[in-house]
Image (tube, rainbow, N blue to C red):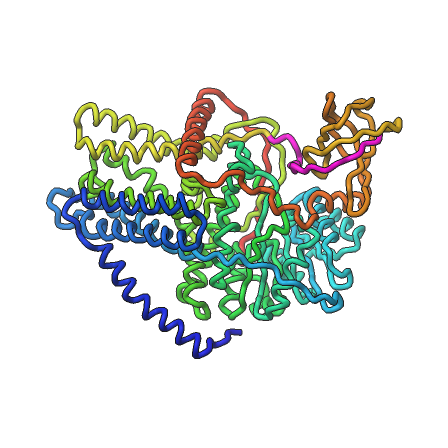
Amino acid sequence: MTEEPSFSRTIVRFAGWIAAIPAVALFLFLATIPVSDWRTQLWLGIAVFAVALLLKTILDGKRWVILTLISLSLFVTFRYAWWRATQTLGIGDPQVHWYEYPFIFILFGAEIYSWLILVFGYFQTAFPLSRKADPLPADIGGWPTVDIFIPTYNEPLSIVRATVLAAINIDWPPDKKRIYLLDDGDRREFEEFARTLGIDYLARPEHKHAKAGNLNFALSRSEGKYIAVFDCDHIPTRSFLQTTVGIPEKNPKVGFVQTPHHFYSPDPYERNLDVFQKLPNEGELFYGIIQDGNDLWNAATFCGSCTVIRREALDEIQGFAVDTVTEDAHTSLKLHRRGWESAYLNLPQAAGLATPTLSAHIRQRIRWARGMIQVFRIENPLFVSGLRLSQRLCYINGMLFFLSSLPRIVFLTAPLAYLYFGIRIFDADAYSIASYAFPPIALSLIANAAIHGKHRHSFWNQVYETTLAPYILLPTFLALINPRLGTFNVTAKEGRIEQAFYDRKIARPFVVLWLLNLGGLISGIVRYSGGFGEIPTILLTLAWTLHNLIIVGTTLAVSWERAQRRDRPRLNLNLPVRITSSSGQVLFGETEDFSDYGTRIRLAKSGPVSMRETVLLEVPFREGVQGFPAEIVGMDESNLRLNFQPLTLEEEQRLMLILYGRADAWVRFGVAQQNDSILKSLWNISLFALIGQGRVLKALLWSSPKPEIPKTRLLRGPS
């Protein structure tokens, strides 16, 4: 599948590499120039910071400014790394005790990891491709056949039916679209539901290889040119196929087209901190900028859902990968190795349910972490054949991210060695540490705010990594030792939380980290007041510990689960409606929120209706209106709350189209209201940290019973 570049392109690339050599040499020379004392380095750092801040403030958003900020960030980071490696490790220094070397080198190793992640991250996100959809032929008769796969295992039919009905609504010639409900749980109600709708139902006789095996079973029993895959809670818009299929139709080398995983319900961070649609979603960085950056290097990752895949490409790699618990990323790696191209269309064309609790979120990320490390061990992108260097770097960065647990724990505990025991973790004075370390931190904050300020606010990556660190440490370590260990788990996506509670079990490691850092803060104050140590060093480690308390405190705040009494989340959807009561009275209003269970309506004028009265709710639908029978379950002078009565399949299908199926349904939904501001973001997480520490004290002093929450069932691991 790989096409050799032309001779002229080879010459251009060679000339580019030749031109880069003096630039790299100059960069390395300037970055390694020694200075006489820390003051010179401090002024250099201030100058670079001032230039970066000026560019970010005045010319924010321009590509050349972003590239300049990246260059400045790399310069001060490399300068700091060179200084760390050559002057701060204490090798040969008689004043460094033997027992201090482990602490010095463990911190240095964590920093090496962070430098790699920084460089690879800049490589991935500096040039997002921002691909546009390619149109399909005007003649519908020439459109290809598509099979739609909806794999399920233990999810309730109440979730699955919305996705199936939305798939039926997808605008595509009926004779060229076939829907398959893949039931790995052998449930009679699912079979009857599929038969009622006239779609295909497949239940395989054996249940090997979890989701990948379920998809492969359907693959061998279908014939479409393309396969569209949707997780059973990911509801597609009616325009999904018309938006995506044109890309592989135009370019026969494209093996798959991935679209974002978009969520119309808040994730645990958004819900428990009450920041839904105010801050970017936890997954927004990956789907908002990283995948777009990967697309430039032909390294976009298949994410298991909201995807169109060419059957020919899957046949060439013998179906979906079954050797790891992340069959999606592994499948895309196999496709790229065989020369197939990928495409990422950054346009939400489906929406699903986010994990309902922090514990469910962590379980899901444990599976992702274990799976990516399994791929790293089984089919390491650094060494396998068939990949370009750029693809190798994109893949390896995605895998290295899930090795962040140990470095994150190191950063959260490193200053405690000095505060508790007086053990040095740097062989340098505090002034030199500050003058070399602060510029890289500041420049990375500015550069990242410019690159992905709309998709991830400052400091939140530390909160997300801290949440996962204690839980993915052991699974990733075991996967490195034996990639066959572990099981596949299905993440719960639906459930009610009747009352708020503090999840003590999930918060336990965060409480330990909080207590350790709180003790370190107290110990540092005692050292300062008693003169036990160098004052500048004490102040520097105290500042570091205070920062750690803010990060851990915010994580503690997320561990307090807020009540969720609705079975399904409601969308903030504003539609004009007409309500006709049983007595014939007509009221007009506008929906304030809407779900497939019910709606809340702001009335233009109140009228004579009563509680528990059955009414007809009429909503605009295409060129006309669609009526839905509903019951009044709440009311005041200006608002009505309605629950839908049992709907016919046709009514339910139209309701799905109104709620989720519009082509522009998710274009603006979920986008953060505010761009990143570094100082404001620091202020916000500081407030959340105070809230989190208050919540943990409340949980420790008063009991909070843990209500029933969604469970996660296990499938057998890959065999």
Residue 290 placed where, x, y %? 48, 53
SS majority, magenta: loop
Tell me the residue at 69%/67% (across/down). Answer: 137
Asked if the stretch drawn in magenta spans residue 280, the answer is: no
- 10 vs 207, nearest the viewer: 10
Outermost residue, front direction? 58
Residue 695 visible: yes
Lateral position of residue 547 relative to residue 631, left or right = left
Which residue reaches farthest left?
Answer: 94
Q: Quadrant of the C terminus?
A: bottom right
Relative to 217, does residue 267 appear above or below in the rendering? above
Between 680 and 177, the residue placed more toward the observer is 680
Residue at 36% in and 44% down: 54
- Residue extending furthest bottom? 7
Q: Can you give x and y, in whole percent of width and height, for residue 367 in the image? A: 50, 49
Residue 334 or 586: which is nearer the viewer? 586
Horizontally, residue 413 falls left or right of residue 342, namely left
The residue at 55%/29% (across/down) is 562
In the rendered image of this protein, does residue 102 appear above or below residue 615? below
Q: Which contiguous range is marked in magenta?
A: 564-580
| Residue 565 lies in the magenta-colored region | yes
Residue 39 in the image: above or below residue 231: above
Asked if residue 358 can be seen in this view, the reply is no
In which quadrant of the rendered view does residue 633 lie?
Answer: top right
Residue sitting nearer the eye, 143 or 57: 57
Quarter of the figure with residue 499: top right
Give the residue displayed 25% in from the left and 59% down from the top. Answer: 28
> Residue 249 location, x and y as percent?
64, 67
The location of residue 219, given as percent across then percent down, is 65, 63
Query: How many labels were placed on the picture?
Result: 0
